Amino acid sequence: MLSVADFVATLVVEAAVHYLDLTVALPAAPGPDPASLSLVRRVLTGLLGAPLPAGWDDVTAALKGTGREPLAARFPLFA
């Protein structure tokens, strides 16, 4: 069973990522709350089982970690 805290965390992650989807082409739009982006990073790190690259800020981590931005020209290695 999903706890209330886990359910709310899931909603926060979804909201932050989809907000980025909606505002990526709007440079004047304010970014998502920094705490929500930090949570996205923690969730992605947990799913990966290793730290994300230290050079990625939280927005980059959210966009690359969810496939909204490509990781590199040679990835994916297979589809």
Image (tube, rainbow, N blue to C red):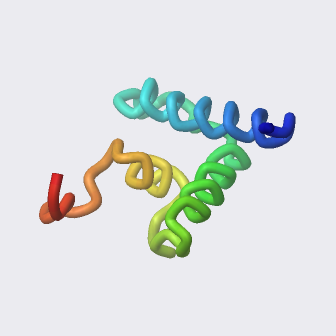
Where residue 72 sits: x, y (%)?
A: 21, 63
Q: Quadrant of residue 32?
A: top right
Position above or below: 31 against 65: above
Name of the residue lying farthest toward the top: 22
Where residue 62 sits: x, y (%)?
A: 49, 49
Name of the residue lying farthest toward the right: 4
At a point 46% along the width and 73% down the height, the residue shown is 53
Q: How many marks?
A: 0
Residue 7 vs residue 14: left or right?
A: right
Where residue 74 sits: x, y (%)?
A: 13, 65
Q: Quadrant of residue 9?
A: top right
At a point 86% along the width and 35% down the height, the residue shown is 4
Residue 48 vs residue 38: left or right?
A: left
At a point 35% along the width and 29% down the height, the residue shown is 25
Position above or below: 10 against 29: below
Residue 77 vs residue 16: left or right?
A: left
Residue 52 vs residue 12: left or right?
A: left
At a point 68% along the width and 40% down the height, the residue shown is 33
Where residue 47 sits: x, y (%)?
A: 55, 59
Position above or below: 58 against 48: above
Position above or below: 28 against 48: above
Look at the image and tell me in which quarter the N terminus lies: top right
